[in-house]
């Protein structure tokens, strides 16, 4: 064998040896395949063994959408009870802030209507009636209703303020407000008529009215059987009071109230305290003008809601009209 032939044979043996070594390094899984995105890879552990690497994503107890069979750890008692305790506290606060209302009704010889007015009003709120020197059965009827309320026949309570003689609307309403303010528990005070001119079933409208308003006036949008002269008097009265309550002599519109002489209205506690403590100058229906002026001249906020109104027997006469006119001019002079 020549030297050239021997070197070629040595080269072949070296190549075969290298090829065999390469085959031994291949894995038995077969030909190489491209990795899919998200596929698991293997890494060597510190002891030389291989283990699958954890995928990013769900908790290890929930693998690839399969629910875990392990029982969840119970929540801490304090955290679980917190929402329920918070709900209880919220309910207690709402109950504490529930609106408390007193309906104030002046009455003079109203035996025919007083029972219906009071009983229907007791469905919605406590009632205080000022018996203004009645000479008929008005006081006796009120006493019967109060006993019924004490026995639980009515959902609210009745208070009676007794005047030995008639003092007319201003003192009758004011004394009812004084009693209510002294109780220290009422948020709203609603005044209304005892002769069924005002509908007791409209009381919820006043209770739900603008909570930011200090005086909510029931504007008589649906009057029944009202004489023309009474409508004219109310219209003129509104013009005079709006001007008297304006902030300038050149402002004729003022607060732009449509019905300033309506006695069906709601006072806030702040407004009721002012009216109850005032030295009133009014003598009859002009009280509604004076009460409104007392509140609005202290920067209190007025509002109006529509009410129905049924004209009935009224003590309104020329003397009362003259008193109202005089008081209107007094308000203008004291702008």
Image: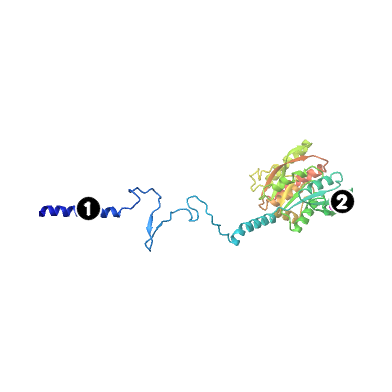
Describe the element under mark 2 as helix, strand or loop. Answer: helix
Q: Quadrant of residue 45?
A: bottom left
Q: Outermost residue toward the left?
A: 2
Residue under label 1: 16
Q: Residues within 10 Å of mark 1 (few under 14, many from 20)?
A: few
- Label 2: few (<14), some (14–19) or many (≥20) C-alpha neighbours in 10 Å: few
| Residue 171 picture location, percent across and down | 80, 52
Q: Which residues are magenta?
A: 141-146
Q: How is the image coloured?
A: rainbow
**Image height of 76 relative to 303, above or below:** below
x and y, in percent, of residue 329 in the image: 73, 46
- 324 lies above or below 78: above
Q: CA distance from mark 2 to mark 1?
A: 125 Å
Q: Residue at x 60, y 61 (%)?
A: 77
Q: Which residue is mark 2?
A: 144
Which numbered dot is residue 143?
none
- Relative depth, front residue between 123 and 159: 123
């Amino acid at each position: 064998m020549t030297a050239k032939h021997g070197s070629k044979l040595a080269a072949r043996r070296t190549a075969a040896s290298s090829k065999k070594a390469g085959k031994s390094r291949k894995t038995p899984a077969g030909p190489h395949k491209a990795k899919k995105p998200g596929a698991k890879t293997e890494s060597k552990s510190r002891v030389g063994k291989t283990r699958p690497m954890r995928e990013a994503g769900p908790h290890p107890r929930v693998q690839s959408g399969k629910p875990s069979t392990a029982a969840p750890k119970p929540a801490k008692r304090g955290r679980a009870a917190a929402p329920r305790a918070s709900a209880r506290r919220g309910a207690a606060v709402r109950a504490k802030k529930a609106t408390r209302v007193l309906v104030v009704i002046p009455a003079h010889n109203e035996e025919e209507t007083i029972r219906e007015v009071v009983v229907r009003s007791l469905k919605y709120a406590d009632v205080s009636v000022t018996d203004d020197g009645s000479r008929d059965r008005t006081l006796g009827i009120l006493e019967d209703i109060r006993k019924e309320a004490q026995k639980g026949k009515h959902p609210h309570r009745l208070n009676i303020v007794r005047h030995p003689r008639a003092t007319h609307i201003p003192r009758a309403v004011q004394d009812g407000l004084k009693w209510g303010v002294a109780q220290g528990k009422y948020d709203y005070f609603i005044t209304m008529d005892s002769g069924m001119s005002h509908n007791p079933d409209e009381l919820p409208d006043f209770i739900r009215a603008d909570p930011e308003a200090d005086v909510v006036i029931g504007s008589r949008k649906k009057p029944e059987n009202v004489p023309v002269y009474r409508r004219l008097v109310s219209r003129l009265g509104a013009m005079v009071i709006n001007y008297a309550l304006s902030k300038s002599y050149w402002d004729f519109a003022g607060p732009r109230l449509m019905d300033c002489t309506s006695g069906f209205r709601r006072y806030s506690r702040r407004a009721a305290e002012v009216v109850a403590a005032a030295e009133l100058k009014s003598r009859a229906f002009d009280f509604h003008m004076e009460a409104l002026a007392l509140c609005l001249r202290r920067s209190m906020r007025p509002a109006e809601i529509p009410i129905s109104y049924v004209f009935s027997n009224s003590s309104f006469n020329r003397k009362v009209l003259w008193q109202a006119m005089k008081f209107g001019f007094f308000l203008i002079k004291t702008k």
